[in-house]
Amino acid sequence: MTVGRENLLSINGLRLKQGERILLVEDSVALSTLLTQRLEEETGATVTRCGSLSAARKNIVEGTFLLALTGLNLPDAPNGEILDMLLQEEIPTIVFTAMFDADTRERCTRKKIVDYIVKDGTKTVDKVVQTVSRILANSAHKILVVDDARAARSELVEILNRQNFRVLEARSGRQALEILTNDETIDLVITDHHMADMDGYELTRRIRQSRNSEQLRIIGISSSSDRLLSASFLKAGASDFIYRPFVHEELKCRIDNNVETLAQLTHLRRLAEQDYLTGLANRRHFFATMRQRGKEAMQGSIALLDIDHFKLVNDTYGHDAGDAVLQAISLVMADMCIPAKHMPARIGGEEFAICLSQLDAFQAHSFCEELRKRIEERVIKVGNRSISATISIGVVEFEPDETFENQLNAADQLLYLAKANGRNRVYSTLTIPEAINAIASAGG
């Protein structure tokens, strides 16, 4: 589980970096106004709008754009000349138009646009915003294209790049397996069937030995006339299959559907594993992970910590302030723990646990002391108030012959001593003599 400063709390959509721009070319003032408002609200982009080819050209000279949205028929460009200009400027483009026939589709395909949207009354704005949001979100997904034919591989890579995906290439099944072994962030594999070293069926079968469909989606693709090939791929664990020559819209929709399915599964898993308020691991996920890892998890130390006088914060400032304190402390924990590959979790109201991977008693105590200091120094803003908070920590190094429950109980005894002896301190067997007796009396 990864939790960073930007995504510690639940984030439903991807927003652009401040200052990035979308060019909107539309001669309808009403539609242009609605689109600008919705796009800026829901993506965070700065939308530059204009109603003609000449105005669009002037804006492009004056600045750079991440994406363009345009109609086909403009007052000074009635035959779709805007597409030629945007293609020449290499700006990824989405077209929305009231009329769409075979000739229009062919023109848009030839110009290699990102997507097209047929205007549909009041639903047009929703469709545009959804399409833009999807394309922006694609940058978070990594796709591996596997094909030993360079031309076929390049065609797929070009299509995926236009859709704003991050794309990797493999010239063979073996190279694909090497890439997947070294990169666990790949979301989707698109593989051809006929390859010299390993066919797509075998590649799919091998991938599924270590990565299930909730972790990685696989789309098989082939120009074979064998209509049973798709069934073979699906039985081997593929998520989808497409025959060549494919229709570009179908390929795009199948890719989008698989990426969306994976995103939904990831979101559901996150809901099941994360604490809703802080974004840290929840109690159930923390304990399940520790038990699942077994001896691997027991190589290091465990810390239990509690926010000092937390009830007083709620009683004095209200529960919103209490939530703000929990979130602020969780941010500090995430900033320190995640880069070091430690696992922080919220296991109760104001109680937290950290699995300190590979840290011995000395290192764990030092880490917890630094965490205590950072939280003590943190000023938490709640409205026009500034609140400070402190924590008490009990930390023990895992003993190889002890159960996880006993180790947890020992850390809990140390936490109790830290609170009983003044709070805002770290107790461990290394520095506090009475802690040794506490662990012994707990039957540790």
Image (cartoon, helix red, strand yellow):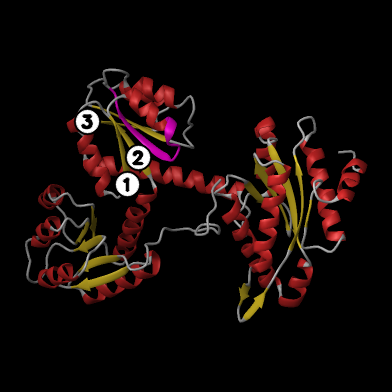
Looking at the rendered structure, the kind of residue marked 3 is: Arg
Viewport quadrant of the C terminus: top right
Q: CA distance from mark 1 to mark 3?
A: 21 Å
Q: Position of residue 218 (x, y in %)?
A: 38, 33
Q: Residue at x 84, y 51 (%)?
A: 432
Q: CA distance from mark 3 to mark 2?
A: 19 Å
Looking at the rendered structure, the kind of residue marked 1 is: Phe
- The answer to which image quadrant residue 182 occupies is top left
- Does dot 1 land on a helix, a strand or a loop? loop
Q: Which residue is mark 1?
A: 165
Q: Position of residue 325 (x, y in %)?
A: 66, 67
Q: Which residue is mark 3?
A: 244
Q: Residue at x 63, y 46 (%)?
A: 343
> Of 421 and 159, which appears nearest the observer?
421
Left/right of residue 390 with respect to residue 104 in the rendered view: right
Looking at the rendered structure, the kind of residue marked 2 is: Ile
Left/right of residue 108 with respect to residue 140 in the rendered view: left
User: The magenta stretch spans which residues?
Assistant: 181-193
Q: Is residue 187 above or below residue 434?
A: above
**Is residue 269 inside the magenta stretch?**
no
Q: Which residue is mark 2?
A: 143
Crowd class of label 2 (few under 14; some 14 to 19; many from 20; radius 10 Å): many
> Of 272 and 324, which appears nearest the observer?
324
Marking on residue 379: none
- The answer to which image quadrant residue 205 occupies is top left
